[in-house]
Amino acid sequence: MAQDHLPQQAAPSKLLDGIRRMIEETRSAVAVTVNAGLTLLHWRIGRRIAQEILKGKRAEYGKEIVPTVSAQLVPEFGTGLGVRNLFRMIKFAEGRRSAESRSCFP
């Protein structure tokens, strides 16, 4: 309780600047990591749907199955897995097939 009444002293600006810089650097690094992880996840989801569910079939079958998959995922994971986004993920994966051999995409 005695500590509650201690006067606050101004922290040295050099110390505060250093701490602020560490916080901002960490925030930036976390944002980059999260963005990379989400990009990879979206590519993998698109690839999985294209390979395992659509199996090369197009148009009509995709129009039927993708909404079903979305309807089962959205309640658990949110609207980011809506029908429109799943189709975008499929297109993304199809456009990145050549990247499999030369980048971070497994």
Image: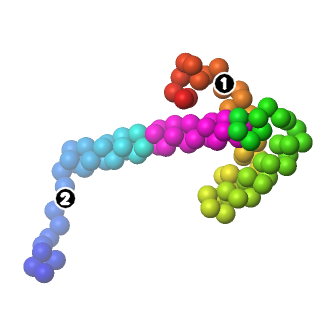
Residue at 73 percent of width and 36 percent of height: 50
**Which image quadrant: the N terminus?**
bottom left
Q: Quadrant of residue 75?
A: bottom right
* Magenta segment boundaries in residue numbering: 31-50
Residue at 64 percent of width and 41 percent of height: 45
Label 2 packing within 10 angstroms: few (<14), some (14-19), many (20+): few
The residue that disc 1 covers is: 97
The label shown at residue 106 is: none
Looking at numbered disc 1 in the image, what kind of residue is underneath it? Arg
- Where residue 34 appears, as percent x and y from the top left, is 49, 43
**Mark earlier in primary sequence (1, 2):** 2
Colour convention: rainbow
Q: Is residue 27 above or below residue 76?
A: above
Camera-side residue: 7 or 63? 63
Camera-side residue: 37 or 65? 65
Residue at the bottom extreme, as displayed: 1
Looking at numbered disc 2 in the image, what kind of residue is underneath it? Ala
Q: Is residue 95 above or below residue 67?
A: above
**Which image quadrant: the C terminus?**
top right
The residue that disc 2 covers is: 10
The CA distance from mark 1 to mark 2 is 56 Å
